[in-house]
Amino acid sequence: MKILAIANQKGGVGKTTTAVNLAASLAALGQRVLLADLDPQGNATMGAGIEKRSALPTVYQILLNQVTVRDAKMRSEPGHFDVIPANRELAGAEIDLVNLEQRDLRLKVALAQVADDYDFVLLDCPPTLNLLTVNAFAAAESVLIPMQCEYYALEGLTDLVATIKKVKQRLNPGIQIEGLLRVMFDPRSTLAQQVSDQLKQHFGDKVYDTVIPRNVRLAEAPSHGKPVLAYDAHCRGSKAYLELAGEILARARKGAGVTDTEGN
Ligand code: ATP
Ligand code: MG
């Protein structure tokens, strides 16, 4: 089971769009996928076609050890993956968890129980570096960072990389940056090209070859409660996220080749 946190503390950069559509694309390629919504906004829950108001229990009860992942999981019928939903209740988790033991490790412990049930677990993080995000980083093997190639994009990454380093020292020595994903990309923009080049200079082959274009179908699909593959399978957004899923699988297989002796 590979756990990927999808994170960027900058708001509106395509984290949730990537989480929902990567989940559906990995599922379309035959993978068993769980998507956990860690954002009280519940956008990933809605985008997967689950009504967040009725969706109880949620990740909140999992963090408080009141239910297990198996009890809380729901099925995204249009996406062919499982979902741990979230809703506004999760906004209180920070306060409720603060005095509890191992408050950073709650998600990691809960997900360990379903290690055999899934090939991929995707964690859709909120746009802050709070306790929920730290729980995600503590549980994750690696972090997938969606970003727009804008002027301040690289500066924003500095804080994120620093947080990942802190988590590495304190909670999760194995955590890595999985990859940087350029989203809402406009190839005609000179600035986007420049930022893209800088990104490759800094992060090398951590930058995915796959680029997600700006595509209105990706923005429309959530209002229909569907991943884009179920909404318009042939649009550019669908093709791009399928290509990303293929790239991630190819990288995982390459990595597995090296560490095969460890039996994972
Ligand atoms: P938040 O920080 O609030 O959680 P986020 O990082 O999860 O936001 P999204 O909700 O995925 O970002 O995307 C922000 C907005 O941009 C949404 O309206 C979404 O539909 C739109 N969007 C995301 N990716 C694309 C794309 N490739 N093309 C067009 N619109 C997109
Ligand atoms: Mg989001």
Image (cartoon, rainbow, N blue to C red):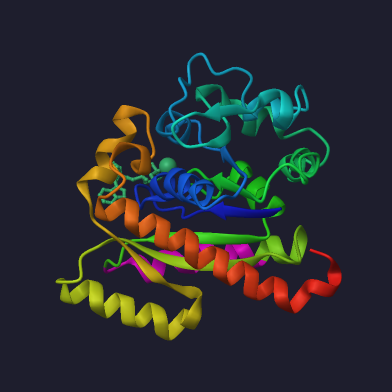
Q: In the displayed structure, would residue 185 be above or below residue 217?
A: below
Location of residue 126 in the rendering, given as x and y in whole percent from the top left corner: 49, 43
Examine the rendered structure and indicate whether residue 193 appears above or below residue 127.
below
Which residue is found at the position 35% from the left and 53% from the top? 13
Picture coordinates of residue 138, whole percent (x, y)? 71, 53
In the rendered image, the quadrant that contains the C terminus is: bottom right
Q: Is residue 204 above or below residue 38?
A: below
In the picture, residue 35 is in which quadrant? Answer: top right
In the drawing, does residue 116 fall left or right of residue 206?
right
As drawn, is 211 to the left or to the right of 236?
A: right
Q: Quadrant of residue 258?
A: bottom right
Residue ID at (78%, 27%): 65
**Magenta-highlighted residues:** 151-165
Q: Residue at x 47, y 24 (%)?
A: 50
User: Is residue 2 within the magenta segment?
Assistant: no
- Residue 38 is left or right of residue 154, and the answer is right
